[in-house]
Image (cartoon, helix red, strand yellow):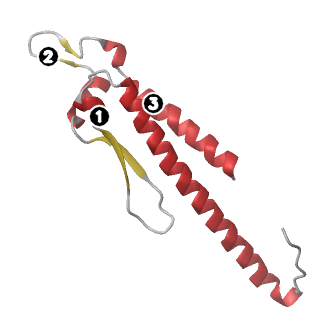
Amino acid sequence: MSTQVVRPENFEKAVQKALAEYGDIVLEKTEQAVKNNARQTVSALKGSAPAGGSYARGWSHKAQKGGAYKLSETVYNRTDYQLTHLLEKPHPTGGGGHYPKNKDYTGTIARIEEEYTNKFMEEVMSKL
């Protein structure tokens, strides 16, 4: 880091320039963290998917469009999206049973979401 002498009449411009540079750094590091976290979340969901096959392979993420400072990735199941709700919140079936029969998977998506939300916050804080 270089030290520069700033004259009082240029102080405002120097502070604005420093804040703009810092804002660019924050934006870049946060964008990297968002993409990295989305990839890791998809990988975790694929690994813990109870109904293998196309459901497990269907997990994906995509960037959401927004303003200059709107960073967002959506994690979703592109093939069997209907199963995500059924596996998270079991439902009674017409024949008197429940779906899914094995309730060990209930809440898996919510647990992974919470885990990776915390990891995202830690990653952003450590980079800044």
Using the rendered view, name the quadrant where residue 64 is placed.
Answer: bottom left
Whole-percent x and y of residue 103?
A: 32, 13
Which residue occupies 21% across, 34% down? 82
Which residue occupies 25% across, 31% down? 55
Earlier residue among tags 3 and 1: 1
Whole-percent x and y of residue 120?
A: 56, 42
Count of picture labels = 3
Pointer 1 residue: 57
Pointer 2 residue: 93
Of all residues, the one furthest to the bottom in this rendering is 9
Q: Work out how far the residue at label 3 is from the one at label 1, CA to CA, in angstroms.
A: 17 Å
For marks 1 and 2, give the one nearer the viewer. 1
For marks 3 and 2, give the one nearer the viewer. 3
Of all residues, the one furthest to the top in this rendering is 96
In the rendered view, would you say 23 is above or below 52?
Answer: below
Viewer-nearest residue: 24 or 69: 24
Earlier residue among tags 3 and 2: 2
Viewer-nearest residue: 59 or 86: 59
In the rendered view, would you say 122 is above or below 70?
Answer: above
Q: Secondary structure at mark 1?
A: helix
Q: Is residue 64 left or right of residue 98?
A: right
